[in-house]
Amino acid sequence: QLLESGGGLVQPGGSLRLSCAASGFTFSTYAMTWVRQAPGKGLDWVSSINDSGDGTFYADSVKGRFTVSRENFKNTVYLQMNSLRVDDTAVYYCARGPFYGSGRDPYDASDFWGQGTMVTVSS
Amino acid sequence: SYELTQPPSVSVSPGQTARITCSGDALPKTFAYWYQQKSGQAPVLVIYEDNNRPSGIPERFSGSSSGTMATLTISGAQVEDEADYYCYSTDSSANRGVFGGGTKLTVL
């Protein structure tokens, strides 16, 4: 199971930290990914982090503003979002990425997702 | 930048075969994955690595890939298969994931 939290309403230029708590699998052996979906729009890959946390990957649209991290002892992955813009408004999903021994890149496809948390950037 | 292109919509009658395509220049070198998203729900993986079905996904869902095009086929589509479908692949040159724009499947 994946349970996102931390969404809400924030003004443009503000910050928000999303959390995703995992259970039911060995968290430390999987990459994790964040995907977002703006209202009425399609899915948009945002960021991925490898199993150990020392490899991070970002979409160009969030590079330099968002930071992904994880605490394996807490089974939790985070997305720190700074300098938020109106077009960051979306449901943010966390998803389980590839197993560390699979040979696949951390940003490869995810096999299951949380239910998402809504982030609204508006003045 | 690398893109995956899908038709915006596909419509079939119940029991017919629905085919949703996804085109991308890197697909000959990378796998395609397919997600189903029903209204108000999180996406669900229905096909992985071009043509494999996760456990619990009905056998009517199948995938194929040839050259720069991947195809999701739903044989004998059911009303409950109405959803948005997204293809996904990776752009290793830019270390990122890429979604197609999504296809709305209507079954009625």
Image (cartoon, coloured by chain):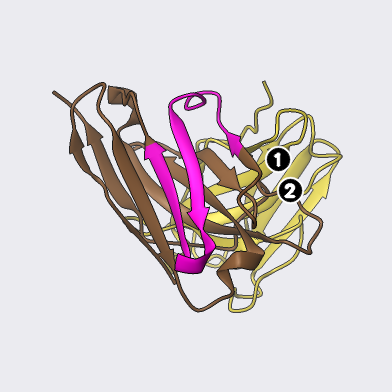
Chain colours: A brown, B yellow
Q: Is residue A70 magenta?
A: yes
Q: Nearer the viewer, residue A70 or B23?
A: A70
The residue singled out by tag 1 in the image is B90
Q: Is residue B38 magenta?
A: no
Determine which quarter of the picture holds residue B82: bottom left
Q: Quadrant of the C terminus of chain A?
A: top left
- Which of the labelled discs sits on residue A105, or is there none? 2
Estimate the x, y position of residue A107 in percent, counting from the top left: 65, 46
- Which of the labelled discs sits on residue A101, or is there none? none
Q: CA distance from mark 2 to mark 1?
A: 9 Å
Q: Determine the residue located farthest toward the front in the rendered image.
A: A73
Estimate the x, y position of residue A9 in percent, counting from the top left: 17, 38
Are marks 2 and 1 in one subunit?
Answer: no
Label 2: chain? Answer: A
- Judge from the rendering whether residue A36 lies leftward or rightward of residue B57; answer left or right: left
Which residue shows up at 26% across the image and 21% down it?
Answer: A13
* Pointer 2 with pointer 1, Cβ within 8 A: yes
**Foreground label between 2 and 1:** 2
At mark 2, the secondary structure is: loop
Which residue shows up at 76% across the image and 39% down it?
Answer: B69
Q: Nearer the viewer, residue B12 or A66?
A: A66
Estimate the x, y position of residue B67 in percent, counting from the top left: 86, 38
Assess disc 2: are there few (<14), some (14-19) or many (≥20) residues with their C-alpha within 10 Å of its C-alpha.
Answer: many
Q: Nearer the viewer, residue B97 or B39?
A: B97
Which residue shows up at 69% across the image and 43% down it?
Answer: B89
Three-letter amino acid code at the position of disc 1:
Thr
Determine which quarter of the picture holds residue B34: bottom right
Label 1: chain? Answer: B
- Judge from the rendering whether residue B35 lies leftward or rightward of residue A94; answer left or right: right
Three-letter amino acid code at the position of disc 2:
Asp
Q: Which residues are magenta?
A: A57-80
